[in-house]
Amino acid sequence: MNKLLSTLTIASILASLNPLNSLAAESVSIAEERIADSARLDWWLDDKFGMFIHWGPSSLAGVEISWARATHPYDHPGKLEKISDAEYDVLYENFNPVEFDADALVRTAKAAGMKYIVFTAKHHDGFCNWATELTDYNIMNTPYQRDICKELADAVHRHGLKLGWYYSTRDWTHPDYLVGDNSAYNDYYHGQLRELLTNYGDVDVLWFDHVSGRWDQYRFQELFDMIYELQPDIIINNRAARFVFRSKAGTPDPELVELTKGDYETPEGKIGVFRKDDPWETCMPMSHGVDGGGWSYRPDATTQSFEECAKMLSACVTGCGNMLLNVGPMSTGELRPEELENLKQFKPWIETYGESIYGTEGGPYISGQWGGSCTKDNVIYLHVFQWLNDELALPALPREVIRCEELGGEPVSFEQTERGLVLSLEGGKERTVHSVVKLTLADGPELALIKVEDGAPKKQHDTLVNPMAGKKK
């Protein structure tokens, strides 16, 4: 490994010293071209719903992935319960998830209506779930001795979903992380990403997760050039350089800052506020540990109800965002029963309400505690969280409503005037999950955004900011 790192370092130095390096110039244009090509996001904007998977040897101890390790070099300490480095760092020696079935997991995600999967190839603890040649701290040196990333990638491609790798640039166990000019660590993590983007077929999403240090300790332009050269159509989240922004050392070019912001924002553990111009994706754990966390398997965790999960998906979609719903497999490789049951319940829900999720665009009614709306062609879908005496009063629309119906439910009567639109539920049917009402409109003017509730945007969906906060067994 040392020999390989030295070779990579020498090569990068030679490239940086050569002002006539035409390949480097070409790579820069490739990166700029890819960032400017917003069409790369079209599939993601339509698909709306993905599965996040946090998994590694920490599941053996039932502690939070990475954050349970006592020390976090060059980073904040966190607030979760911890075990010693010595105890955490040897968990992999007994990691043997013999019940892991990548095909079954992908089929479960697909049946639940999820269109893409983002998997933790490497978290902050540095453990690698693939057969990397750059460190021994990987899945091939566990009793399992099988490349989890390969098995998952093959299953994702086989079943027609999109594949994403989560990769933490942080690495709390690597000896070169933020040492000196950080050059050796740059070589290391660039090399690892080259493996992940070369050896597993098409990769559709690269999900970075923060990093510490100074701007001058990273070679971000080189990194993004490599990524787009290897996977031209990939989309990237906004965390490749997050927390480097907080450093006062160095003044990066504005163009470089923009490059590292990637394609979309990532509100974590809360529903993003309504906004149409900046793509965003909420990442949310399905379960919540008693001390916080809950991204990885925690036997003490409380799992959100299916109703809460469905409501969060609707809140994201009507707010012009996506939802990446996280599961944390057990050490055996199986999903915890409560999370699996929620995913199974999504199947009939998606069969009924899926038309109001996929391929839609948030609006025209701006989301709030009442619910939210999204559009597709001449249809508005209202995801209603709150009815008042089986009625919902909304501001007026500039186009005629020619039909109104509740998806999977009873007819909905309506009265449309110049002053507003009033919907009335019929049939007295009990609704255990929020209602979705389909309004079919006549042709007419373009629908502008319409405010429903007073209050600042930050108040939208405030009951969903952290649905599991304070919930303990």
Image: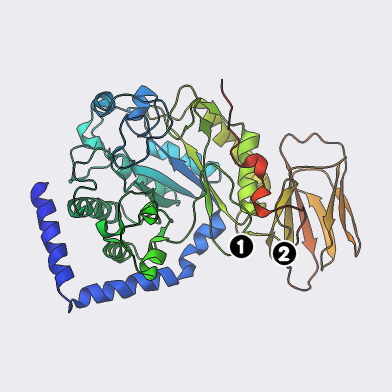
Classify 10 Å Cα crowding around label 2: few (below 14), some (14-19), many (20 and above): few
* Residue 212 visible somewhere in the drawing: yes
Q: Residue placed at 43% from the left, 39% from the top?
A: 53
Q: Is residue 304 left or right of residue 97?
A: right
Q: Quadrant of residue 366?
A: bottom right
- Mark 1 / mark 2, whichever is N-terminal: 1
Residue on which the image places disc 2: 449
Quarter of the image with the C terminus is top right
Q: Residue 306 at x, y = what percent?
A: 62, 34
Q: Nearer the viewer, residue 1 or 204?
A: 1
Please tell me whether mark 2 sits on a helix, a strand or a loop. Answer: loop
Q: Is residue 164 left or right of residue 464?
A: left
Q: Residue furthest front?
A: 248
Q: Which mark is on residue 169?
A: none
Q: Is residue 21 above or below residue 294?
A: below
Q: Which amino acid type is shown beneath numbered disc 2?
A: Leu
Q: Nearer the viewer, residue 354 or 361?
A: 361
Q: Residue placed at 56% from the left, 23% from the top?
A: 472
Q: Which amino acid type is shown beneath numbered disc 1?
A: Lys
Q: Nearer the viewer, residue 265 or 227?
A: 265
Q: Is residue 60 above or below residue 439?
A: above
* Residue 460 visible somewhere in the drawing: no
Q: Residue furthest left?
A: 3
Q: Is residue 296 above or below residue 229?
A: above
Q: Is residue 143 above or below residue 152?
A: above
Q: Nearer the viewer, residue 87 or 387?
A: 87
Q: Residue 147 at x, y = what percent?
A: 27, 40
Answer whether labels 1 and 2 touch (C-beta < 8 Å). Answer: yes
Q: Is residue 283 left or right of residue 251?
A: right
Residue on which the image places disc 1: 276
Q: Residue 379 at x, y = what percent?
A: 73, 61
Q: Residue placed at 61% from the left, 62% from the top?
A: 276
